[in-house]
Amino acid sequence: MTKGKSFDFDYTASRTAAKFHASDAFVRLLMGPVGSGKSVACIAELFNAGLNQKPGRDGIRRTRWAVIRNTQPELKTTTIKTFHDSIPPFAADNHYTQGSPITQWVRFGDVEMEFIFLALDKEEDVNKLLSLELTGAFMNEAREQSAGILKALIQRVGRFPSAREGGPTKSFVILDTNPPDEESWIYKDFEENPKRGYAIFRQPSGMSPDADNIENLPHGYYQRIIDGAEGDQELINTMVHGEYGAVTRGVPVFKGVYSPDLHVAKEPLKPLPITAGKPVIIGYDFGLTPAAVFLQQGATGQWRIIHEVFLPDEILGAEQFAPIVQGECAKFFDPNQKFIHWGDPAGSQRSQADATATVYRTFQTHGILMRSAPTQNLTDRLACVRNPMARLIGGEPGLLVSPTCKHIKKALNGGYCYKMVRVSGGERINDQPEKNVSSHIADALQYGLAGGGEFALMNGAKGGRKAPTVAKSSFNVWNR
């Protein structure tokens, strides 16, 4: 595309990528098999738009771009590595800093591009995203992110350069991804009910004669993936043929314990009669996409997951989420029902990002007295779910899920998983569950069961529950 000093961006668009580049759609998604050149095409789109930006009053063509990935490790080992293969960090007048956020400047001639790399598992990066003024943005591997991030980006792009400097010549949000499942927001917003200004560009199967990027892959690349899949047709359909599927990209956290046939009720579960005197336990996970899980423990000791509140396509703060939960309590339960609320212990810790409020205090202003769950230790939290799941009480499972709780069902059935990571000589299972759309609702379930009594039972504790925690410091985990 251009050459300045030792910097050379060598790129030739595939058939699908050429259509992607030619589109004027404000939100564009490039989707296809693994190895099909999606990320490089998106990097080239940002670069080309930077080249074609109108000069400002001082004659410089300035643009600012955000590049988004769901976690910091994937941002560094995958996204940035691919970026540097195309745009080296220190060639020509480029400058690269690994501060917070990670930023790369590309300067040559009258062109000045700023690329800001953000990971959604870092509090300071999320805060930065919500305050940036951008020319455009790129969501890398979008199926691992929420529609709420896209909505936030749409609000931040088109704002640099300023109108006084002539504004951006072209502004957009672009995404790339391997195919998600058909319950994904991607399928809904780009295929099922396409939103205005959205466009999807689907690449051919890797086994097709028209496959994209095949000239840059080893001979027999896709056949080796098929052979290695050992008959896993879902994996083959998504990773080779670029079709929607339901691929579990790792090992389900509750593998060998959870069974949909056993743990999902045949009919929707209703709250126990108010005369039973059983409180409704609500477990919460905070963050960009908060979640709440409603549980009750019957007289036999069986836990019943009767309701959930989770809006993965929205970015919500405590001020927005608390009244939603209150509304669900009023809608689904008796007016005299007692509720006990157990939250992520992080909700009572200090955050440098917000000096004026705490999540717990915010909930309290809406009439919700939040208790801090008794543990944040992952091993203990998972045991608080596995233990009742493994019990049989009079032939019934110790944990029963209402079929209406679709997000919990998806998480327990493998959406909440340990990711496979590459190491020398092969792969191993990461010891931490993957941070994805299912992890929020799974964490909320863990906090609810831990606070509801499973942690005390596991540790042989006697006596009552932990007293409510009222934070003394100012904190807002919704900005993390």
Image (tube, rainbow, N blue to C red):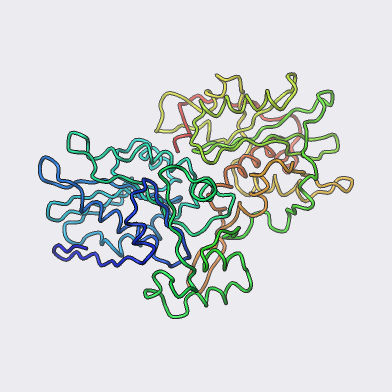
Q: Residue furthest bottom?
A: 219
Q: Residue at x 57, y 24 (%)?
A: 323
91 and 410: which is toward the camera:
410
In this image, 397 relative to 207: left or right? right
Quarter the C terminus occupies: top left
Where residue 84 appears, as percent x and y from the top left, is: 30, 61
* Left or right: 258 in relation to 352: right
Tell me the quarter of the image containing the N terminus.
bottom left
> Nearest the camera: 464 or 400?
400
In the displayed structure, 8 sits above or below 97; it is below
Image location (x, y in percent) of residue 390: 77, 51
State how many labels appear. 0
Q: Extreme right residue here?
A: 394
Task: Pinpoint residue 321: horizontal percent, then vertical percent.
Answer: 55, 29
Residue in view at x 81 percent, y 30 percent: 272
Is residue 206 or residue 363 the one in the foreground? 206
Question: Residue drawn 42% across and 78% down?
Answer: 218
Q: Position of residue 178 (x, y in %)?
A: 49, 59
- Quadrant of residue 234 within the rendered picture: bottom right
**Residue in front for this viewpoint, 131 or 56:** 56
In terms of image quadrants, where is residue 168?
top left
